[in-house]
Image: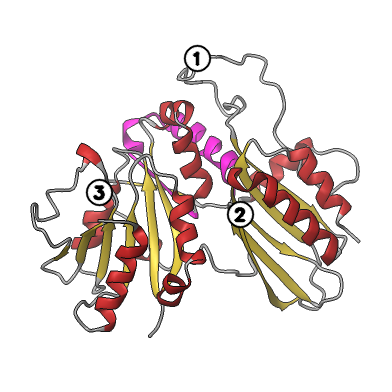
C-alpha cells in the first residue's frame, strides 16, 4: 500500500485553523481526507462540524471525509486508521492532524519517524502554521508556544490581514522571517486557500533544495564582515529595548523583538570533512536537541560528487545522498538552523572547524 501523506496543522486559538479545516473538508476537491482532532478541554471549538456525543470516535462525513478525535494518543489513533483503511472499512487518501492551540508540533512530527509501524503506513508531508495577523504580535511576545509553532513551520499562512494596517502585516512578516526563513508565508482570507498550497508540500522530503528567502540572505550579507561566507545574525542593538512583553513596536522593519526562536544560516564553499561534521552535529544535537526545532542543509562533502542532504527535528536527524553536483554548478554548502536561544557562535565556529 502506498504511504498515506499526513499534514500537521498548528496555530494559536482563533488563528483560523477550524475555518481552514472546514474548507478543506467541505470543498469538492475529490479527495478523501481523515482529520484527526487533538483539541483538549472545554476549548473544543469544532462541534459544529463534528457530530457530538457519539461513542465511536470516527465520524464519516457526507462528502466521504472522516473526522476522529484522539482518544488515547496519536500513535494509537493513526494505527487504528491505517488498519481500518487496510481492511477496507474506511476510505481516505490523506490525514490532517489538528494540534491544540498550545501544542508543540515537535513530538507530533517525531511520531512519524520514531515509530516503525507508523512509518510503514504514513509519510509526514509538512507542518502548516496559521498566524492570526491581528493578535500575532501579542501572542508571539507572550507565548513561547506560538514562537515554536512558527519555528517548526514548512508553510506559514497569515490570516486576518484585512483587520490590520499593511505596515503591521509587513512588520509581522519580517519578524516571522527572522524566526523561520525557510517557510514561505502567504496571507489568506477566511481559510480560502487552494488545496494545492496545503497538501503535498514535501516539507520533510530530503530534497536537494533549501529554500531560504533571498531577502533574508541579503540582509545577512549587509552585516557580515571579513572574507567569511557566513551569515551573521541580526544581533545589532536596537537601542530602545522595551521590557513590556506585549508592547507592539510600530516603527517599521528595523526594530524587531529579540525573539528566542531564531534562525541562522551557514554557508561555505569549502567542503566538509564527513567524520568531523558528523561528530560535531552529533554533539550539538545531544546538547541542544530539545531547543532545535528544524534544521536542514544541502552540503558539499569531501569524497562524493553528490550533494548530501540532511535535516532534523529536535534530536532526530536524517541524511541522504542527493543528486550529483551539475557540471559547472558552484559547490556550496548551505545550512539553516531554527531553534530556541541556540548558541550561534559555537555552532558557526564548530561548522567552520568541520570543513576540510
Residue under label 2: 315
Q: Residue at x 75, y 52 (%)?
A: 283
The disc, 3 or 1, on the residue closer to the chain's N-terminal end is 3
- Few, some or many residues within 10 Å of mark 2 (<14, 14–19, 20+): some
Q: Is residue 161 left or right of residue 49?
A: right
Labelled disc at residue 344 = none
Instruction: Find the magenta span and give its range.
Output: 154-181
Q: Position of residue 338 (x, y in %)?
A: 61, 46
Q: Residue at x 29, y 77 (%)?
A: 83
Residue at 84 percent across and 65 percent down: it is: 275
The foreground one among 262 and 222 is: 262
> Mark 2 against mark 1, which lies toward the viewer?
2
Q: Secondary structure at mark 2?
A: loop
- Residue beneath disc 1: 244
Quarter holding the N terminus? Answer: bottom left
Mark 1 residue element: loop
Marks 2 & 1, CB-CB < 8 Å contact: no
Question: Which residue position holds label 3?
Answer: 18
Amino acid at each position: 500500500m502506498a504511504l498515506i501523506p499526513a499534514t500537521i496543522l498548528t496555530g494559536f486559538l482563533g488563528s483560523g485553523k477550524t475555518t481552514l479545516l472546514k474548507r478543506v473538508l467541505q470543498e469538492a476537491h475529490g479527495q478523501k481526507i481523515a482529520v484527526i482532532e487533538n483539541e483538549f478541554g472545554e476549548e473544543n471549538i469544532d462541534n459544529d462540524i463534528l457530530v457530538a456525543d457519539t461513542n465511536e470516535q470516527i465520524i464519516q462525513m457526507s462528502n466521504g471525509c472522516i473526522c476522529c478525535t484522539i482518544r488515547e494518543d496519536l500513535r494509537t489513533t493513526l494505527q487504528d486508521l491505517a488498519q481500518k483503511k487496510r481492511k477496507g472499512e474506511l476510505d481516505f487518501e490523506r490525514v490532517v492532524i489538528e494540534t491544540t492551540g498550545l501544542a508543540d508540533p515537535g513530538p507530533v512530527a517525531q511520531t512519524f519517524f520514531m515509530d516503525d509501524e507508523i512509518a510503514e503506513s504514513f509519510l509526514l508531508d509538512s507542518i502548516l502554521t496559521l498566524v492570526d495577523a491581528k493578535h500575532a504580535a501579542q501572542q508571539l511576545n507572550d507565548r513561547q508556544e506560538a514562537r515554536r509553532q512558527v519555528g517548526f513551520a514548512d508553510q506559514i499562512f497569515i490570516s486576518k490581514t484585512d483587520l490590520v494596517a499593511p505596515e503591521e502585516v509587513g512588520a509581522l512578516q519580517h519578524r516571522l522571517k527572522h524566526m523561520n526563513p525557510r517557510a514561505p508565508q502567504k496571507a489568506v482570507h477566511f481559510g480560502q486557500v487552494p488545496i494545492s498550497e496545503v497538501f503535498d508540500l514535501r516539507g520533510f522530503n530530503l530534497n536537494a533544495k533549501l529554500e531560504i528567502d533571498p531577502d533574508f540572505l541579503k540582509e545577512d550579507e549587509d552585516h557580515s564582515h571579513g572574507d567569511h561566507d557566513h551569515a551573521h545574525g541580526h544581533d545589532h542593538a536596537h537601542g530602545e529595548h522595551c521590557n513590556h512583553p506585549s508592547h507592539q513596536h510600530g516603527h517599521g522593519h528595523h526594530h524587531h523583538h529579540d525573539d528566542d526562536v531564531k534562525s541562522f544560516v551557514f554557508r561555505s564553499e569549502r567542503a566538509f570533512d564527513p567524520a568531523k561534521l558528523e561528530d560535531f552535529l552529533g554533539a550539538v544535537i545531544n546538547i541542544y536537541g530539545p531547543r532545535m526545532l528544524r534544521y536542514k542543509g544541502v552540503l558539499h562533502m569531501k569524497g562524493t560528487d553528490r550533494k548530501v542532504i540532511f535535516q532534523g527535528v529536535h534530536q532526530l536527524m536524517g541524511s541522504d545522498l542527493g543528486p550529483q553536483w551539475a557540471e559547472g554548478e558552484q559547490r556550496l554548502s548551505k545550512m539553516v538552523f531554527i531553534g530556541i536561544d541556540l548558541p550561534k557562535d559555537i555552532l558557526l565556529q564548530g561548522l567552520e572547524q568541520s570543513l576540510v
